[in-house]
Structure formats: C-alpha cells, structure tokens
Amino acid sequence: MDEELLRNLDQIVNSPSYQLAECDVDFLGRRELRPIRMQLELLKPEMAFTEQRVESTIVVFGGTQVVPKSEATERLESAERELAKSPQSKACQRAVDRARKILEKSHYYEAARDFANLVSSRCQVDGACDYVVMTGGGPGIMEAANRGAYEAGAKSIGLNITLPEEQHPNPYITPELCFQFHYFALRKMHFLLRAKALVIFPGGFGTLDELFDALTLRQVGRMQEIPIIMFGRSYWSKVIDFQFLADEGVIRDEHLDLIQFAETPEEAWKLISAFHEHQE
C-alpha cells in the first residue's frame, strides 16, 4: 500500500465518523440527540436505584447558604472586619446584615442533619432501603441531610445539576447514588418518583421552585399523595402567604391541607409516620 493510501487509511480510522456512536461524545452532544440524552438521564439513575434496591425516598430541600454555625460565624466575623475597614460603606454594612441572618438560620443546618439521621436510623435496618434521604447533592441544607444519613451509616442520594457557577457534590453522599444532571426537568422527576415525603427547609429561588413543582402536581392529582412539610413556620410565613392565596380565591381552601409545618426533626418524622400510618 503506497504512502498516500496509508495516510488516507489513518485519516479514516481517526475520523469521528468511524467512532462507535456510543463513544462519540461530540455526536451525542448534538442538538438532534437531545431526546436520547434526556432518556439516558431518566434511565441511568432509575437503573442504579433498582440495583441498589432503593424502594422509597424522603426528599430534603433547602438553601445552599444555610451553613453550620461555625462557618456562619466565620462569615460574619469576616464581614465585620471588612466593615471596620470601611465603616461608611453601605455594601459592607449590607454584607454584615446578611451574614447575621445566615447565622440566625444556622440551627436549620443541624435540624436537617438530625432529621436525616433520625429517618435513616429508623428506616434503613436489616438491609432495607426505604425512606432513603435524597437531596440536590450540593452544600448547605443538602449537605446537612446527606451528612445526617452518612453519620447513621446509611445510604443517601444526591442529584447534582450542572450550573454556570461550578458546583461540586458534597462529600457525604453514597458514591453509587450520586448523579449529575443536565436537564432540570429530569432531575425534578427523579426527586418525586419514589418520594414518600418532602421536607422543605429555608431556602431561596431553587427551593421555592422545587416546592411549587411538587405542590402543583399534588394540587392537580398528578403524583402520589405525600406529605409536604415546611420546616420553620416563622421563616416560611414571611416568604409565602398561603392563606392569602386561598382568601383571594386563586386556590381552594382544601389546597392549604397539602402543606404541614414542623419545628423539630421529631415533629417532621411524626407527621410522615402519621401520614403513612406507621407504628411509632
């Protein structure tokens, strides 16, 4: 074979077109392949849950900024040092005010941690994989919940999402049950497919999005009946006035029954147990 044909053969075997379709990342990333990618994001976690014998989950939502007291204290002290350098700076004063609010909410981190520990200790016994704690896999409240399960020696799930601002999974998730998603819609589906309860700790836009997604599906009867528990009435009553929605006639009075409130991990677990008629 002459040199020209050898060069051509080399180009052939190294051409993207010659790659197996399943190995061609550029091909799989094409716009036309979006339905296939969405199917893969549905199937990959679903198959793993089956292999790991995950029967049911309890989903914990909450803000990424709700951190342990020690970390919140450090943030406040750092903000105060910056304010001391520039006492007239409104931005620095604002940073101090916000850091104080985060410190005030740090007890929710421990509450989420304790709740996940309680649920995991009660439900993952004798090889059972029921009521497995599931979070969005990130920091803050999500980390706290995965941490509580980890400290109980139990499995927990993290559904991470690719974002413009890089986000890493927290280190407490069971490695075989940590997934990264591109599509929010598929991630939301997995949050609810096996859910036996949702417990929503204080958070921001992302937490609200996940809350209202579940509330809407429950309202219109498009998902299984589960308790939706808002943790921390004082916080949530300022964020959302559900009674106002009913008074204005935009939701029915009975839709208010879709929501329950809890102030302690034990109270949240009792609400879940009562809803599913478990023996305490």
Image: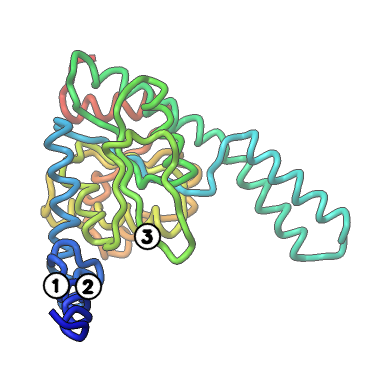
Q: Which mark lies nearer to you, 2 or 3?
A: 2
Residue name at image x 19 percent, y 13 percent: 126
At x 27%, y 49%, the residue is: 256
Residue at point 12%, 37% (across, down): 50
Mark closer to the observer (3, 1): 1
User: What label does residue 162 carry, if any?
Assistant: 3
Tell me the number on the disc at residue 18.
1
The quarter holding residue 149 reads top left
Which of 254/52 is in front?
Answer: 52
Labels 2 and 1 touching (C-beta < 8 A): yes
Residue pointed to by mark 2 = 14
Q: Is residue 109 left or right of residue 268?
A: right
Q: Looking at the picture, how far across and down is residue 76, in whole percent? A: 72, 45
Q: CA gap, disc 2 to disc 3? A: 30 Å
Q: Which of disc 1 and disc 3 is earlier in sequence? A: 1
- Marks 3 and 1, Cα distance to the nearest angstrom? 30 Å
In depth, the one of 187 and 15 nearer the eye is 15
Give the quadrant of residue 75.
top right
How many angstroms separate mark 2 from mark 1 (CA)?
7 Å
Hey, what amino acid is under mark 3? Thr
